[in-house]
Amino acid sequence: MNPTRSRRIQAAAAALALAALATACGGGSGDKQSSGPVTLPFWGWANGQEAVVKAFNASHKDVKLKYTKVTDQLTMQKQLTNAVKAGNAPCLVQNTAEFVTTWVSQGALADITQYVGSSKTKFNAGSWASAQVQGKSYGVPTSSAPNFTVYRTDIFQKYGLKAPATWDDFIAAGKVLKKHGIKITNYAGEDPSTLEVLSMQAGAHWYSIDGNSWKVDFQDAGTLKAAKVIQEIIDNDLNSKLSFADYAAVQRNYDNGGTATRQISTWQMAGMVQNFTKSFGKWALSPWPTFQGEAAKTPAGTNLTGSVTLVTKQCKNVQQAAEAALWMSTNTDAVKTMASPTTGNGVMPALADSQSYVGEAISEKLLGTNYEPAKKVVTDSLGTVTTDWAFGPDFTAMGAEMQAGWAKVVSKEETVTDLLAHMQEWTVKDLKSRGISVKG
């Protein structure tokens, strides 16, 4: 892993975004620190946060957290946008790393470096960098994101299949399962993260820095390699098309054996544990499939990135908010609560010793006799996460545009390459409309 390069990219990205947007961010209510008991509004969506907030409030006399549960991360971006415009943003916000640069460029976040900087060594380098822009901390990382495949052992054994080591193996297994009415994966029409994470794994760079400009490239060799895999899966009808809008229905499909694999991180196992009734003990983990002839490499993009707790600039108690965020990410009991797929969200902590929590973050109930071997899969994945991906200054808007096009891809109204050509043109135009120098 190369966290130094990752930080350089984030620094350059932020410098360009901030300069281009020329956001005037001086002063603000966040500079005013109150004395005495304070209440800090905290927005998040992860299971287990209510319990962590309750524990925090029980152990703190002068600072209290007021938790509001938001539906999901995309809803969070919309609600936070409205709150920032209205001047009533919460103090603390759960988010994922891809949105940090965007929110900093909009002047929405407070620099909390002076309050959390001394705790840097408590976290793994990649996670710490995820909450930073231009060397400054705007939040505290809460999780890292090992990625792997979870698959139904009984189904694979029944049809003489092994866990797919490569994407070619994955497609071949999908064709066998299709003959028996089983899909190998699910592509929700509203979730284009599959395209991003496979592109990232293949070495793509949708955004990069070229001199004093952004370079946009949705059609590089890595992206096209990823597109080929996805298109073959869609063309051969190897994927379910279940929307996460009915999350319980998606989980029932996995539980009933309608779909046999998922590429996930630890936190997604929580939904399986909480919703399954039939297939406990029939699941196992295997490494994220590789591209043929390539070494293991796992993505660190979109909702696989790992979460951060951000502090907004409109907060009137920035120091207390920063310290609360730090407590939630380092208190042993809070970390264990969130790491468990039963009590929390199954997230791997962002801490430097996160490997010691692998046993907490995966479910023995779900995996049964495959639980012990799964620990090595997760631990190995922590060492193969890509670190050279840059999130552009309009990443939120780009994601929304891609989401609309992805729905057409899943329904076979257009191809993956059609979508990529559109995203190339749209993103260049969007950055220019924001006054940002761009090449592409």
Image: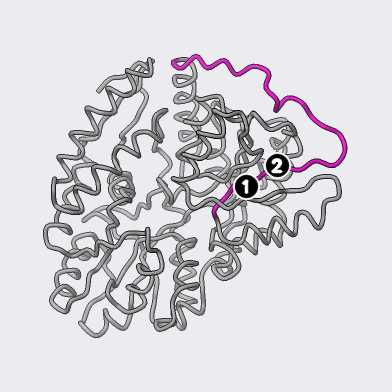
- Vertical placement of 384 versus 255: above or below? above
In the rendered image, the residue lying farthest to the front is 86
Instruction: Please say whether residue 28 is one of the residues in the magenta stretch.
Output: yes
Q: Is residue 19 left or right of residue 111?
A: left
Label of residue 123 in the image:
1
The answer to the question of whether label 2 and label 1 lie on touching residues, with beta carbons closer than 8 A, is yes
Q: Position of residue 379 (x, y in %)?
A: 49, 62
Label of residue 297 in the image:
none
Would you call the spot at circle 2 few (<14 residues within 10 Å), some (14-19), or many (20 or more)? few
Question: Which residue is nearer to you in this view: 401 or 184?
Answer: 401
Q: Amino acid at mark 2?
A: Ser
Residue at the spot of label 2: 119
Q: Which region shows up in magenta?
A: 20-45
Question: Which residue is nearer to you in this view: 316 or 104?
Answer: 316
- Vertical placement of 343 versus 283: above or below? above
Question: Which residue is nearer to you in this view: 399 or 184?
Answer: 399
